[in-house]
Image (cartoon, rainbow, N blue to C red):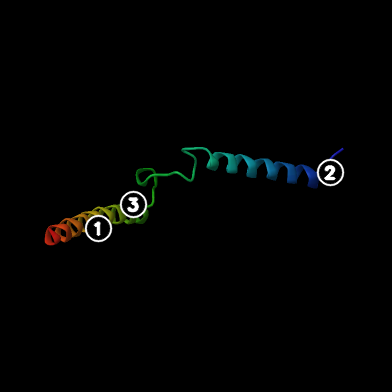
Amino acid sequence: MPSDGDSQRTDESRRILARVSGEAEPGGASHRVAGETADPIEKLGTRIARTLSIAITIAVIAWVVIYFLRIA
């Protein structure tokens, strides 16, 4: 007969395995988007990062176009 300590460890192991399997699946806890979070700072940070990535991408594309136009 399992002791009380064994059943606690078994319960904890099952909780850990359930959490890990939920995080490993697509759409699990590790795949959140900015709209799903309640933290306003995280939303702001995500918006800033997306805006900066678009601005940097446009700047790099413009630089490449200008670079090739000067060579030609």
Q: Which mark is residue 15?
A: none
Give the alpha-carbon distance from disc 3 to disc 1, as whole Å.
20 Å
Residue positioned 69% across, 44% down in the render: 13
The part of the image, by quadrant, that contains residue 60 is bottom left
Secondary structure under tag 3 reads helix
Give the alpha-carbon distance from disc 2 to disc 1, as whole Å.
60 Å
Q: Is residue 52 above or below residue 31?
A: below
The part of the image, by quadrant, that contains residue 51 is bottom left
Indicate the amino acid at tag 3: Lys
Give the alpha-carbon distance from disc 3 to disc 2, as whole Å.
47 Å
Front residue (pair 66, 20)? 66
Foreground tag (3 vs 2): 3
Say few, some or many: other residues with alpha carbon within 10 Å of mark 3 (under 14 / 14 to 19 / 20 or more): some
Q: Which mark is residue 3?
A: 2
Q: Which residue is mark 3?
A: 43
Q: Position of residue 49 (x, y in %)?
A: 31, 56
Indicate the amino acid at tag 2: Ser
Residue positioned 53% across, 42% down in the render: 23
Q: Are marks 3 and 1 in contact (CB under 8 Å)?
A: no
Q: Position of residue 26 (x, y in %)?
A: 48, 37
Indicate the amino acid at tag 1: Ile
> Which quarter of the rendering shows the C terminus?
bottom left
Of the image marks 3 and 2, the number of the one nearer the N terminus: 2
Q: Position of residue 15 (x, y in %)?
A: 64, 42
